[in-house]
Image: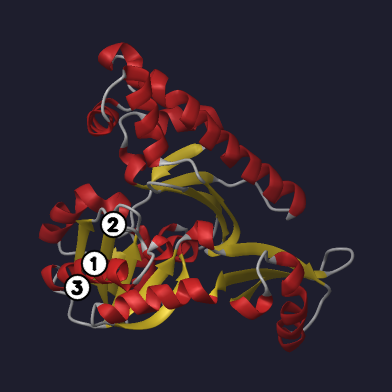
Amino acid sequence: MSVGLDIGSKTIKIVELARDASGFKLRGSGVIGYSGNPPEHAQDDKELGSLATAIKKLHREANISSREIAVALPEPQVFTRAIKFPPLNDQEVASAVKWEAEQYIPIPVSEAVIQHQILERREAESPPEVLVLLVAAPKALIEKYIRVIELAGLNVVAVETELMALVRALAPPDQTVLLVDFGARSTDIAIAKNGQLAFTRSIPTAGEAFTRAVAQSLGVQVAQAEEYKRAYGFSESQLEGKIKSALDPVFTIINEEIKKAIHFYQAEEKGETPKSVIVSGGSSGLPEMIGAMTRSLNLEVVIGNPFAKVLVDPAVAKTVAPYAPLYPISVGLAMRR
């Protein structure tokens, strides 16, 4: 059994997968709303304790059997980038990353946990190069996540970034695709090539910004604006298209950032144009958003199915379907080898 825990700023998600020779099978899952601070914004053990209580409750109610947990760090708090080296062997790359990391991350190396992954060896390039993914996270951030899970009576066995988990759950193994995860406070963008994370970007414009735009435009309370947003989304025919008009400026910001990410990946990383866009997260299910996004980006846009690589009992599938866009990160965490 392996368990993935995704602590968002509004919801906590947990997934347990069983694994055998034929692949993964869903063993248990659950999602719970949470109004407190996530670990990165928690001020003290009291706040972490309140979050730990919610995690413990979710673990129990979702009937999760294992206490060994893989957890994801929030994308805006970590530093991920692809860097190029001359054609070094694996050991030389590991040494070079240690020496070079300082210039790529905005915190002292002594305060960070640094990992790397070789993405590609470009022998045919002139000059030849090795493309390496560098991931760094503040030690203090990791310690907070470990602390809250220990307070919940569970054990952390793995920590990775949200987009690494997302790619594992949603990216096809043989294409270049762009993934967009709409959180409450940030929209995280990844480009995956052949099932590997190749590029990331996180922007502080997401679900809450959509809701605020509706509230301000219509002069209604935030709770009412959230209902309108979820009911009418990008429909031009509902409420005379007023909700769509309110959402459009925020939506444009996100789409422009996606276009910039694609352009940067093509220009700087010599990457190919993504074949499609796979979206997930709370806002991905807004009415008529997929069509609006397809028109804006001029690419095929689909809602990711986090259970596409997992065997799910048909009866269970019906109950998890409404929450599917919330689960990719926790599924990806549970799929770790």
| Residue on which the image places disc 3 | 56
Q: Residues within 10 Å of mark 2 (few under 14, many from 20)?
A: some
Q: Position of residue 235 (x, y in %)?
A: 32, 21
Residue 19 visible here: no
Q: Earlier in the sequence, mark 3 or mark 1?
A: 1
Where, quadrant-wise, is the N terminus in this rendering? bottom left
Callout 1 touching callout 2 (CB < 8 Å): yes
Estimate the spatial distance between the alpha carbons at disc 2 and disc 3, rounded to whole Å: 15 Å
Which residue is drawn at the image coordinates 32% and 71% (left, top)? 4
Q: What type is the residue that disc 2 sits on?
A: Gly
> Which mark lies nearer to you, 3 or 1?
1
**Crowding near pointer 3: few (<14 within 10 Å), some, many (20+)?**
some
Q: Could you tell me if residue 154 is visible in this image?
A: yes
- Return the mark for residue 247: none
Horizontal arrangement in the rendering, residue 121 relative to residue 65 (left or right): right
Query: On screen, 115 above or below 223?
Result: below
Name the one closer to the observer, 300 or 162.
162
Q: Which residue bears the numbered disc 1? A: 50
Q: Nearer the viewer, residue 246 or 42?
A: 42
Secondary-structure class at tag 3 = helix
Q: Quadrant of the C terminus?
A: bottom left
* Dot in front, 2 or 3: 2
Q: Position of residue 171 (x, y in %)?
A: 47, 58
Query: In which image quadrant can residue 122 be found?
Result: bottom right
In the drawing, does residue 33 fall left or right of residue 156? left
Q: Is residue 91 above or below residue 246?
A: below
Provide the residue designation for mark 2.
36
Q: Residue at x 62, y 75 (%)?
A: 117
Vertical side of 182 occupied by 116: above or below: below
Label 3 to label 1: alpha-carbon separation:
10 Å
> Which numbered disc flags the more N-terminal residue, 2 or 3?
2
Q: Mark 1 belongs to which amino acid?
A: Ser
